[in-house]
Image (cartoon, rainbow, N blue to C red):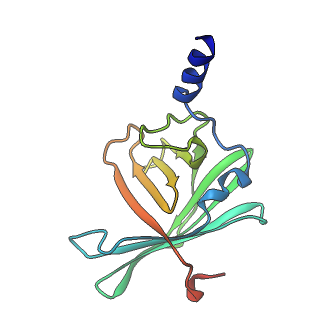
């Protein structure tokens, strides 16, 4: 009985945050929303993450709709004392988000080690960024710190086309 209680406590505990870039290796690859992701504009979102051996994960994302690029950003996850997500929308100044040390895992997260949350309460929007992977599916969510105004991106893994490869 004691073993069962211990196992239940472990399964319901918040997940420990990634400590190292290699802990987020599961994020690497090419990811695309299924068209159209945004029914209003018909936009499709693509994110590409390049795995280590660099001392950081490098990424970029872009939105295509109505036959043209509607937006883009450069991203990276690096160690700056602890892990940080750095976003540069449209090539602008870097905005830094700190990893949440013990983010509560959502009910639908089957693998606690494939879930990460970054926050920056001082930023206007978003203040919270999360990623969760389940097999060939990646869910990204941006929101306010209290998870209001959430916007979710449901990606599927795609074979990286030659023009997206570094």
Number of numbered labels in the structure image: 0
Give the quarter of the figure containing the N terminus.
top right
Q: In this view, does 7 lie above or below 57?
A: above
**Residue 81: % across, % down:** 74, 44
Left/right placement of residue 86 relative to residue 124 reads: right
The one of 8 and 49 positioned closer to us in this rendering? 8
Q: Is residue 41 left or right of residue 142?
A: left
The residue lying furthest to the front in this view is 1
- Is residue 150 shown left or right of residue 166? left
Q: Name the residue nearer the viewer: 78 or 107.
A: 107
Front-most of residues 87 and 151: 151
User: Compared to 85, does 82 lie above or below?
Assistant: above
Residue drawn 20% across and 71% down?
40
Vertical order, 41 against 76 (above or below)? below
Tell me the residue at 45%/47% (across/down): 127
Residue 10, horizontal then vertical, whole percent: 59, 26
**Which residue sits furthest left?**
40
Please indicate whether residue 51 sits to the left or right of residue 39 in the image: right
Q: In this view, does 65 lie above or below 92?
A: below
Between 52 and 119, the one lying in front of the other is: 52
């Amino acid at each position: 009985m004691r073993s069962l209680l211990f196992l239940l406590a472990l399964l319901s505990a918040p997940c420990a945050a990634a400590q190292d870039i290699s802990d987020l290796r599961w994020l690497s690859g090419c990811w695309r929303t299924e068209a159209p992701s945004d029914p209003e504009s018909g936009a499709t979102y693509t994110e590409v993450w390049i795995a280590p051996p660099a001392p950081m994960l490098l990424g970029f994302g872009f939105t295509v709709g109505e036959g043209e690029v509607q937006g883009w950003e450069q991203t990276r996850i690096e160690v700056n004392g602890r892990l940080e997500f750095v976003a540069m929308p449209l090539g602008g100044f870097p905005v830094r988000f700190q990893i949440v040390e013990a983010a509560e895992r959502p009910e639908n997260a089957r693998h606690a080690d494939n879930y990460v949350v970054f926050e920056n309460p001082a930023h206007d929007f978003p203040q919270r960024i999360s990623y969760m992977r389940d097999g060939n599916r990646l869910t990204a969510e941006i929101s306010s710190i209290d998870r209001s105004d959430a916007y979710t991106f449901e990606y599927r893994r795609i074979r990286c086309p030659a023009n997206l490869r570094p």
